[in-house]
Amino acid sequence: MFKSIALAIAITLPTLGHAQDFARRERFTIPVNQIDGTTFEVIEADAAGGTQMWCAAGIYARNVLGVRGGDLYIAQGRGDAQTAPGRKGVTFSTQPVPNAFSSVSQGVRRTGKVFSMAHAYALCRNLPFLRVRISNNQLVRR
């Protein structure tokens, strides 16, 4: 009896750490659709929250638009998506928007919130499995 229990524990313990690592590796594939040369919409997907949305905006601005400095602005807070009917999205811009304000909150509900590109991109540090899917179905990673 005790040998069976000891064997079960010996087999299970090494895999617990791997299971926890796997659970921590959240996987997000977030669609991003360009609206114009400086404005794009991040579509809510895979239960992504504000952190993931800002990170996706940073990845898109850097890797697709080629913008490495400056600020990212929420041109339209979280709401009905313009580019994906039936979905929720956030419209970001690399150009200043009226009533822009800084905040430490990573929320995406308020129009006008501004983060530096570096800050938005830095939020990706803890999201190694986040990917951005652009309109031609190409995947963009940080």
Image (cartoon, helix red, strand yellow):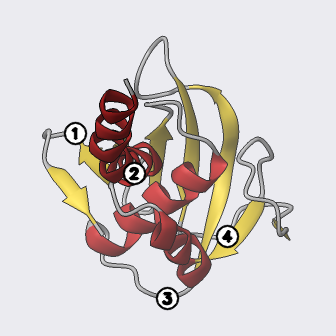
One can see residue 34 in this view: no
Classify mark 1: helix, strand or loop. loop
What is the CA distance from the residue labelled 2 to the residue labelled 1? 25 Å
Alpha-carbon neighbours of circle 2 within 10 Å: few (<14), some, or many (≥20)?
Answer: few
Classify mark 2: helix, strand or loop. loop
Q: Amino acid at mark 3?
A: Gly
Q: Which residue is mark 4?
A: 96
Q: Amino acid at mark 4?
A: Pro
Classify mark 3: helix, strand or loop. loop
Q: Closest to the observer: 15 or 69?
A: 15
What is the CA distance from the residue labelled 4 to the residue labelled 3? 13 Å
Residue 20 coordinates in the image, percent (x, y): 44, 48
Q: Amino acid at mark 2?
A: Arg
The numbered mark, 4 or 2, whose residue comes first in the sequence reads 2
Numbered mark located on residue 25 in the image:
2
Q: Residue at x 18, y 50 (%)?
A: 139
Q: Residue at x 66, y 54 (%)?
A: 74
The numbered mark, 2 or 3, whose residue comes first in the sequence reads 2
Residue contact between numbered discs 4 and 1, judged by CB atoms under 8 Å: no
107 w.r.t. 141: above or below: above
Residue placed furthest toward the top: 86
Numbered mark located on residue 69 in the image:
3
What is the CA distance from the residue labelled 4 to the residue labelled 2? 34 Å
Of marks 2 and 3, the one in the foreground: 2
Q: Which residue is mark 1?
A: 135
Residue 61 coordinates in the image, percent (x, y): 40, 68
64 w.r.t. 79: above or below: below
Q: Amino acid at mark 1?
A: Ser
The numbered mark, 2 or 1, whose residue comes first in the sequence reads 2
